[in-house]
Amino acid sequence: MQLHLSPRDGLPIYRQIVNQIKYLVAAGRLAPGEELPPIRALAQQLVINPNTVARAYLELEQAGLVAKRHGSGTYISDGASPLRRAERVKVLGERIDALLAEAGHLEVGLEELFNLMRQRFKTMQPEEGK
């Protein structure tokens, strides 16, 4: 499981972890029953405090997305995938908030941001006929 954290994201680190794990579940890249990395291992990989990872895992557990098995680890819940549409939209909304905050810091206006998004979207689309 590869997570990418950004201190300039505008969201707390634990929230970035929560959002990215929710995204991975919604995208089917983390399947029900799959084990998450141990707290200390993930903290070491991300070079952050283990308490930050523990807070993210606790929030995911309270949301019913993961379940802890005493002495065994933390696993994606059986009923966790796919996320409800409302939850997926919420995750995207939080990512949009971070993008808008970053655009504001870089003094990029909304119309310019939309144009950039349209360009990026076009480059990500598969070419016809291939």
Image (cartoon, rainbow, N blue to C red):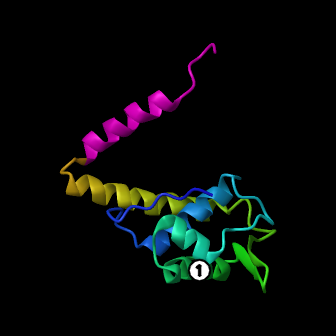
Question: Residue 90 appears at what percent x and percent y?
Answer: 52, 64
Q: Is residue 124 left or right of residue 118?
A: right
Q: What predominant SS class does the magenta segment belong to?
A: helix
Quarter of the image with the N terminus is: bottom right
Q: Secondary structure at mark 1?
A: helix
Question: What is the quadrant of the C terminus in the image?
Answer: top right
Residue at 27% x, 47% y is: 110
Query: Horizontally, is 103 left or right of 1 in the view?
Result: left
Magenta span contains residue 121 = yes
Q: Position of residue 32 (x, y in %)?
A: 79, 63
Q: Nearer the viewer, residue 37 or 105?
A: 37
Q: Is residue 74 above or below residue 7?
A: below
To which quarter of the image does residue 8 belong? bottom left
Label 1 neighbourhood size at 10 Å, few (<14), some (14-19), many (20+)? some
Place of residue 128 in the rendered image (x, y in percent of width and height, measured from the top left): 59, 17
- In the foreground, 38 or 129: 38
| Residue under the point 53% across and 59% down | 3
The picture places residue 58, in percent across and down from the top left corner, at: 61, 82
Instruction: Name the residue tied to disc 1.
Output: 59
| For residue 41, side relative to residue 99 (left or right) | right
Question: Of the residues shown, which amino acid type is indicated by label 1?
Answer: Glu
Name which quarter of the figure residue 73 lies in.
bottom right
Residue occupying image coordinates x 35% and y 55%: 99
Residue 111 sits inside the magenta stretch: yes
> Please, which residue is most extreme toward the bottom here?
70
Read off the magenta span.
110-130
Kindly give the residue lying farthest to the left in the view shown: 107
